[in-house]
Amino acid sequence: MAKKKVADVLVETLAEAGVERIYGISGDSLNGITDAIRVHERLQWVHTRHEETAAFAAGAEAHLTGRLAVCAGSCGPGNLHLINGLYDCHRSRVPVLAIAAQIPSHEIGSNYFQETHPEHLFAQCSHYCALVSQPEQMPRVLEIAIQTAIARRGVAVVILPGDVALQEAVEQGPRLHFPAPQPQVRPSDDEIDTLAYVLNTSQKITILAGAGCAGAHTELIELASKLKAPIVHAMRGKEFIEYDNPFDVGMTGLLGFSSGYYAMMDCDVLLMLGTDFPYQQFFPKDAKIIQVDLLGEQLGRRAKLDYGFVGDTKTTLNVLLPKLEQHTDERHLKISVEHYQRARKGLDDLAKGEPDRKPVHPQYVTRVLDELASEDAVFTCDVGTPTIWAARYLTMNGKRRLLGSFSHGSMANALPQALGVQVSHPGRQVIALSGDGGLAMLLGDMLSLQQLRAPVKIIVFKNNSLAFVELEMKAAGVLDFATDLSNPNFAQMAQGAGLLGLTAETPSQVRPMIAQALNHDGPALVEVLVHRQELSMPPTITLEQMKGFSLFMLKSVLNGRGDTVIDLAKTNLFR
Ligand SMILES: Cc1cc2nc3c(=O)[nH]c(=O)nc-3n(C[C@H](O)[C@H](O)[C@H](O)COP(=O)(O)OP(=O)(O)OC[C@H]3O[C@@H](n4cnc5c(N)ncnc54)[C@H](O)[C@@H]3O)c2cc1C
Ligand SMILES: Cc1ncc(C[n+]2csc(CCOP(=O)(O)OP(=O)(O)O)c2C)c(N)n1
Ligand SMILES: [Mg+2]
């Protein structure tokens, strides 16, 4: 029998770790690996058109499954292209392994053709990055990378020169055979007693919950019920917190609801659970703040704390709940929930389509999509105004999922993330809410949908501009410039690439066309000609107030129309 090569051991080790596919683009330095995949019975090669797409796609797969996903790039420019997508994976704390192929090992250091130094390049977007320079290191280095990506939830990179991949292996297969550890992380008994005491002796408690509450919905609702506390959520928590939740008062932050803002500002105690909500100006100054997070280094990062505890949300709440007394004063909760209902109604009123009134309101498009999408649809939204529409008009239900580039904030994420979700979840309805700028940025991977038979549905918010940036420019008191987009007919381009392509110009076309796309047996794109200045900025704020501030530094929440920024800092908290 032919001796195994290092590349064979790499592929077998990945398969043994539960990896089903590798996203990437082939190249000379990757030949050993792609050839080993070719003959492997289970591992699949997913060919994208840009390595950045491969990294975003792997991150999306990992987000959905919680398990390791893998991408690869050839030496030099091939793996350099992975970087922005990997930053997104790393910031979103999803376990992703990147294989960065390297130039021939004996040329390293000679400024050889395509030479780069991935150890430096990937250092900031990974927890682990190591060069395999000898066969003896494999599979140990790969297994360390896998363990690091999973345990620290982020990116790990293995750098493998093409010639080393083709050398004879020393070890013949994976070294590690043990089930994934399932530790239970929670504060000590004394700390739980302290936490219970503080909560039992406080009134007007608000919970700020984030993505770290995934899997703890029941416990979170029970907690809010015991404390009579409104629950504000941070954006990445939306998919886990908003549904079946009578305590929901919406999101806070610029894209949030005034109700979320007030519930946080007007509390005596703020209890942060599994959140890294980044905007300091939205935290109360006088309230007592308590934070529980799985990672100790997250404590106090965003707001000054009175108490910080390390624990997994579900495990912590399970030991805390029996120690909590039932609160009975419902005033704070009632005021917050009623405020939320008013804010929600204000937004819902904007999501109407008046027949044949052009251009279409993007809120209406998103509302129709929300109504027509399946019970367990997966949505991805581009950074830009699609993030606003997704945050405000997509309804989560515990089965649906919502992904974006929420922590890294990179444009062009929606299509690549949708691709990764669709390839790894073939039966599921996957919908990308794309900006016209975002779609164009990684447009090449529209072609991958047809090639990979991935029936992703793309909804393009065609406003012929970088509209979110226009908004930021208005907020900063500068005239909009450099934001025009002269766009092609995306529907025709889609048709040319083998997708169903449709253009909706009027509100009355929106529903039938989205329905047609969702029912289409294959990839489809609907471009909707939407209002460019849907959120026209804000006559009530003076230039002087704005100057020097980015939109995100303002202590303000965009109201539904965006025609006023509610300057909450100056508003009386009376509701
Ligand atoms: C254009 C744009 C506008 C945005 N505007 C807003 C806005 O207005 N409002 C808003 O909320 N966001 C907004 N965001 C998103 C924002 O940047 C953050 O990504 C988001 O608020 C963070 O959400 P999170 O705290 O739920 O998730 P993360 O930032 O992922 O934080 C999760 C936290 O939970 C911890 N954790 C993980 N697992 C567990 C566990 N099992 N138990 C306990 N802790 C755990 C983690 O260590 C981490 O600290 C915007 C993004 C973009 C791109
Ligand atoms: C890679 C990258 N480049 C630039 C930006 C700055 N930026 C944020 S939103 C945005 C505009 C997005 O335009 P589009 O996709 O058309 O969405 P719109 O806001 O117009 O709906 C830009 C340029 C970014 N976040 N990421
Ligand atoms: Mg645009």
Image (cartoon, grey):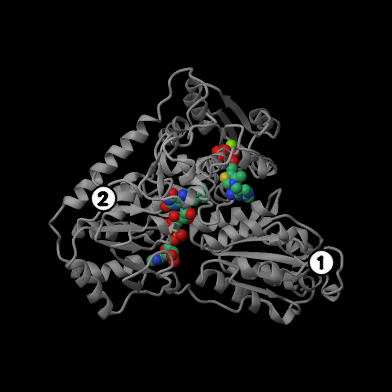
The residue under the point 31% across, 70% down is: 316
Q: Is residue 288 at least partly visible in the picture?
A: yes
Mark 2 to mark 1: distance in Å? 55 Å
Q: Position of residue 448 (x, y in %)?
A: 67, 44
Q: Position of residue 135 (x, y in %)?
A: 74, 79
The quarter of the picture where residue 503 lies is top right
**Residue closest to the eye, 401 or 288:** 288
Q: Residues within 10 Å of mark 1 (few under 14, many from 20)?
A: some
> Which of the two labelled residues, at mark 2 and mark 1, occupies the earlier sequence position?
1
The residue under the point 77% across, 63% down is: 75
The residue lying furthest to the top in this view is: 356
Image quarter hosting the C terminus: top left
Image quarter hosting the N terminus: bottom right
Q: Which residue type does callout 2 highlight?
A: Phe
Mark 1 element type: loop
Vertical order, 109 against 277 (above or below): below
The residue under the point 54% across, 52% down is: 405
Q: Position of residue 123 (x, y in %)?
A: 65, 70
Residue beneath disc 2: 247
Q: Left or right: where does residue 191 sit relative to residue 451? A: left
The quadrant of the rendered image in which ligand 1 is seen is: bottom left
Vertical order, 460 against 424 (above or below): above
**Residue closest to the eye, 521 or 40:** 521
Q: Are marks 2 and 1 in contact (CB under 8 Å)?
A: no
The quarter of the picture where residue 343 lies is top left
Residue beneath disc 1: 115
Q: Position of residue 76 (x, y in %)?
A: 78, 62
The image's mark for residue 28 is none
The residue lying furthest to the front in this view is: 544
Q: Which residue type does callout 1 highlight?
A: Glu
